[in-house]
Each structure stands twice: as C-alpha cells, then as structure tokens.
Amino acid sequence: MIPLSYLEDTRGIRPSSVLSMYLLGTVVLDIAQARTLFEIHCNTVGSIFVLIMGIKISLLVLEARDKRNYLREPYASYSKETTSGVINRSFFWWLNSLFKAGYRSLLSPKDLEKLDARLRSKELGQQMQAAWKNRGTYSAMNWICVLTKLN
C-alpha cells in the first residue's frame, strides 16, 4: 500500500481511488469478522483485530483527504471537485464548505469554486458558434458528435 500511495500522491492530483476503495471494502468486511470473533469469545484476537481496523480507518481517512495544499502550481488552483477523492466525489462532500458558507451568509460569484476549463462559457460559446456556422453541413449524427465533444 505504501508504494501505491506514494506513486499516486506524486503523480496525480487526486487521492488514490484504488487504495481508497480497497481500504473501504476491507473495513466494511472486517466489521462482520470482528463481530464474529467477539461472538466466539476470542476477545484477545478480536481486540487485536479491532486495533487493526482502527489503523485501516486511519489510513482511509488520510488517503481520502484533499491534497490541494501539497500540490504545485497550476495544480494547486484546481477546484475542490477536481482534486477530491472517490469517496468525496461519491457523496458530494466537497460541496459542504459551499453549503456552510451559503447558510452563514449570502453567496456571491466570488464565493464559488473555479470551473473546470472544459466547462467555461467562453470556450463553449466559441465551439458552439463554430458549430452553428457549419450547421448546414452537419447531419443529425454529426450534431450528436459535436455536442458529445462539448461534454
């Protein structure tokens, strides 16, 4: 796990999805195994197993953390969504800070995160204008391909 975590941290802007899913899956399965160990009165083994589960949960929390503070430019300025791990993106936890800010005060455009470059309206507008100018030459299938590229 240590080499995989190191490689993912040094070469990617997101936490390791493979490692996060592995740790999450094993922790969920370990809960049932720990209960079974305590049910058959193996308290010593069960206690050691629970300790190992605690270490796995700690590793999962550390692996799932956002690492924008450790990234170099231009990656450090990416949005929270872009740099969030698989668990944060699955449960939309990266939006919690925005919800808290909206609850405490009125939101303005400067409070919002930066958009992904592919979603900025200037670039999309230029692509749509180019597609619109060529509308006579496009068939229905070509329009689907153009709109798919915009996504």
Image (cartoon, rainbow, N blue to C red):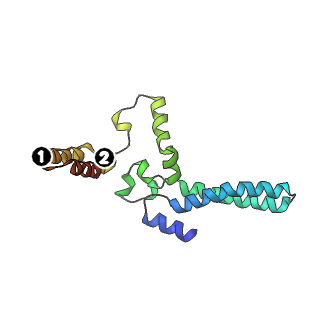
Image location of residue 50, percent across then percent down: 75, 57
Tell me what residue is drawn at x 49 percent, y 35 percent.
Answer: 100
Q: Earlier in the sequence, mark 1 or mark 2?
A: 2
Residue 52 percent location from the top left of the image: 71, 61
At x 15%, y 44%, the residue is 132
Q: x%, y% of residue 19?
A: 55, 62
Q: Secondary structure beneath disc 2?
A: helix
Badge 1 marks a residue whose secondary structure is helix
* Distance CA(mark 1)–CA(mark 2): 26 Å
The residue that disc 1 covers is 136
Q: Residues within 10 Å of mark 1 (few under 14, many from 20)?
A: few
Instruction: Please state which of the two labelled residues, at mark 1 or mark 2, is closer to the viewer.
Output: 1
- Of the 4 image quadrants, the one containing the N terminus is bottom right
Badge 2, how many Cα within 10 Å: few under 14, some, many 20+?
A: few
The residue where tag 2 is placed is: 119
Q: Residue furthest front?
A: 140
Q: Are marks 1 and 2 in contact (CB under 8 Å)?
A: no
Left or right side of 133 for 52:
right
Q: Of the residues shown, which amino acid type is indicated by label 2?
A: Leu
Q: Residue furthest top?
A: 106
